[in-house]
Image (spheres, rainbow, N blue to C red):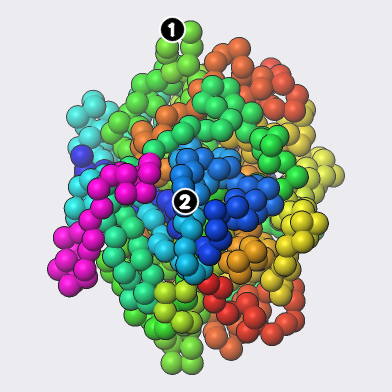
């Protein structure tokens, strides 16, 4: 079959390690405050998904001795894709680890490797499906009652990472994993200091990975999808009512990607985002990214606020 | 590689001037080219030459849909698959359609034509590509639409066309309707991670039910319905509504020639791989809820009026 979507087809999950004995505080925050659904939790591990997702998890949290970003998982079309990636990475002298199915409960066989910048990426073809929370027959596509009154995001949208050498990381993600850039922030020399990278064709928005300058291996933020800005304003009320700390900008137009976004923190310092919208992006070799000047960073990050960008640019965990 | 999205709709209109005015002022598209009897238009958040071609014609309806592929060799492969399925295939040279490279036109079993192409002239986002201000200069009391999102076509045997798109062109079936005897009578198909780019429903062969433009915010959608009414644009009797299918907020209206348009808002992501996730199923008795979630019933014109 020749006309066939291949390679990475979607962002699958993000996996964190949190210093939270018994993961009680994490479970309380991510289910009761954020409104994700717990699925197949086991001792030392919490698996969660958004209510609109058919898969077993999009967020995995392990009990850990320190807060850390463990890995980011992307789903590929099939096992042939998985082997294709393994071979290409091996040719590039990238050390690839192979994992049997069930290495994370629910996940099929997979490969993982460190990208330049330090983060670990996992590729897999199969992830267990629990089915849609609202069912497959005549569903009410309505936020389930048990998570109403929380943001209850619909999907994992993207993950922001910090890397010491963005140019190198961005080039690797394009060359080895087939990512396209939808937006790039360039310094005076025209070198990228940040980029939004995508593989998916969503209604709007071209980012599954956002690359920011910073310390190796760090997480910048995890973003979840919401329908629109009106929802996000209401969600900000729910979060504040639960004592959640919002990031400096509050709800704002984020011209970098052209989303409407709200950034905030979980109890462990993990920066989270609710986002909606985004420019329409096409995974096509002739597609061109929007280019931002680093000198215009303040406007790129928040169209509404006139604030120092340093707090937003800091890594989270 | 693969088809990546519904790129444009080529529509027949009975008055080219009025049609251009409608798509410019009511929808918010920009005119990107004109040839004898044709106007080419594009939405603000698309980089290609056009998402809409208007053709001066004796009656309204669909001329064809344009689908963009990610590799040039996809064109020959799609042509081979269509020929093997016994479908009519016709090649168009670069420039036959303004701003567009070589393409292959396939006539689906439904008699609708789809035109697959790889290259489009690049005109960029309307905001510009460098340090873009998100607000357009000529906003007329309403935010711009983002892009052409999807289209619904009708035909006498939906299952046949749904199967070709799914099995031969790697579209994913996200939601569908099945009759008691198991026949597929309704299909929502996407070549990306969206819920649908092309939908197929029962009706006369070659019919166009609507083309849909994506809107960012529901608040903006409310304002748009206000403006449709203010401007006297013919609409569906329900005004602002919501689909049970996909759970998106929506409104329907008509261009001056009688082609149905939609503004749609709502997030819905799919796997990006055909067949990986079982499609949602709607039964004929649930079509009220499926079509108009608030009202729970379907106005007659929504079934009977196509162009």
Q: Quadrant of residue B173?
A: top left
> At x 69% / y 37%, what residue is drawn?
A146
Q: Relative to A232, does residue A57 appear above or below in the rendering? A: above
Q: Quadrant of residue B191?
A: top left
Q: CA distance from mark 2 to mark 1?
A: 45 Å
Residue A155 in sight in this render = yes
Taking depth in this image into account, of A194 and A62 the one nearest to the observer is: A62
Does the magenta portion include A95?
Answer: yes
Does the magenta portion include B303?
Answer: no
Q: Position of residue B99 (x, y in %)?
A: 41, 59
Q: Mark 2 = which residue?
A: A45
Q: Position of residue A115 (x, y in %)?
A: 33, 71
Q: Mark 1 = which residue?
A: B181
Check the residue under mark 1 and report the chain it is in: B
Check the residue under mark 2 and report the chain it is in: A
> At x 20% / y 47%, what residue is drawn?
A80
Q: Position of residue A258 (x, y in %)?
A: 61, 65
> At x 36% / y 33%, what residue is drawn?
B275
Element type at mark 2: strand
Q: Which residues are magenta?
A: A85-108
Residue reaching furthest to the bottom: A188
Q: Dot 2: few (<14), some (14–19), or many (≥20) neighbours within 10 Å?
A: some
Element type at mark 1: loop
Q: Position of residue B70 (x, y in %)?
A: 32, 54
Q: Relative to B71, does residue B56 appear above or below in the rendering? A: above
Q: Relative to A199, does residue A148 appear above or below in the rendering? A: above
Taking the image as shown, residue B155 lies to the left or right of residue A294, namely left
Q: Are marks 2 and 1 on the same chain?
A: no
Q: Quarter holding the C terminus of chain B?
A: top right
Taking depth in this image into account, of A247 and B276 the one nearest to the observer is: A247
């Amino acid at each position: 079959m020749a006309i066939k979507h291949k390679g990475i087809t979607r962002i699958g999950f993000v996996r964190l390690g949190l210093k939270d004995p018994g993961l009680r505080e994490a479970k309380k925050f991510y289910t009761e405050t954020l409104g994700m659904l717990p699925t197949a939790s086991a001792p030392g591990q919490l698996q969660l998904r958004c209510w609109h997702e058919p898969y077993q998890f999009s967020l995995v949290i392990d009990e850990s001795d320190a807060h850390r970003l463990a890995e980011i998982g992307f789903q590929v079309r099939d096992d042939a894709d998985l082997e294709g990636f393994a071979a290409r990475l091996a040719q590039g002298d990238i050390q690839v680890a192979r994992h049997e199915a069930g290495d994370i409960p629910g996940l099929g066989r997979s490969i993982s490797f460190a990208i330049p910048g330090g983060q670990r990426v996992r590729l897999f073809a199969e992830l267990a499906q629990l089915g849609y929370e609202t069912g497959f027959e005549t569903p009410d596509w309505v936020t389930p009652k048990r998570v109403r009154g929380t943001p209850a995001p619909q999907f994992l949208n993207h993950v922001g990472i910090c890397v010491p050498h963005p140019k190198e990381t961005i080039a690797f993600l394009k060359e080895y994993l087939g990512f396209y850039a939808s937006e790039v922030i360039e310094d005076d020399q025209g070198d990228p200091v940040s980029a939004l990278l995508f593989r998916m064709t969503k209604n709007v928005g071209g980012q599954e990975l956002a690359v920011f300058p910073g310390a190796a291996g760090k997480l910048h933020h995890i973003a979840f999808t919401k329908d629109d800005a009106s929802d996000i304003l209401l969600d900000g009320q729910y979060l504040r009512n639960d004592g959640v700390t919002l990031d400096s900008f509050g709800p704002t137009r984020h011209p970098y990607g052209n989303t409407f976004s709200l950034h905030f923190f979980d109890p462990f310092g993990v920066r989270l985002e609710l986002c909606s919208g985004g420019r329409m992006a096409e995974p096509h070799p002739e597609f061109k990214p929007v280019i931002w000047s680093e000198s215009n960073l303040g406007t790129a990050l928040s169209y509404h606020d006139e604030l120092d960008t340093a707090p937003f640019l800091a890594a989270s965990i | 590689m693969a088809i990546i999205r519904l790129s444009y709709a080529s529509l027949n209109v009975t008055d080219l001037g009025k049609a251009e005015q409608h798509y410019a002022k009511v929808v918010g598209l920009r005119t990107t080219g004109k040839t004898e009897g044709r106007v080419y238009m594009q939405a603000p958040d698309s980089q290609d030459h056009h998402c809409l071609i208007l053709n001066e014609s004796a009656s309204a309806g669909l001329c064809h849909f344009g689908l963009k592929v990610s590799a040039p060799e996809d064109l020959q492969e799609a042509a081979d698959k269509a020929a093997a399925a016994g479908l009519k295939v016709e090649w168009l040279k670069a420039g036959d359609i303004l701003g567009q490279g070589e393409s292959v036109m396939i006539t689906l079993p439904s008699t609708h034509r789809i035109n697959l192409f790889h290259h489009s002239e690049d005109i960029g986002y309307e905001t510009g590509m460098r340090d873009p201000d998100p607000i357009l200069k000529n906003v007329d009391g309403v935010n711009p639409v983002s892009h052409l999102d999807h289209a619904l076509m009708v035909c006498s045997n939906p299952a046949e066309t749904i199967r070709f798109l799914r099995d031969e062109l790697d579209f994913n079936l996200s939601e569908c309707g099945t009759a008691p005897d198991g026949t597929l009578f309704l299909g929502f198909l996407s070549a990306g991670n969206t819920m649908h780019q092309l939908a197929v429903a029962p009706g006369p062969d070659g019919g166009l039910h609507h083309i849909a433009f994506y809107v960012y915010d529901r608040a903006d959608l409310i304002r748009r319905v206000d403006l449709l009414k203010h401007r006297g644009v013919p609409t569906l009797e329900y005004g602002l509504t919501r689909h049970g299918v996909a759970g998106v907020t929506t409104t329907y209206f008509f261009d001056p020639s009688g082609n149905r348009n939609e503004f749609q808002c709502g997030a819905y992501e799919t796997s990006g791989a055909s067949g990986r996730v079982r499609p949602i199923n709607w039964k004929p008795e649930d079509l009220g809820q499926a079509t108009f979630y608030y009202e729970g019933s379907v106005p007659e014109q929504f079934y009977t009026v196509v162009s």
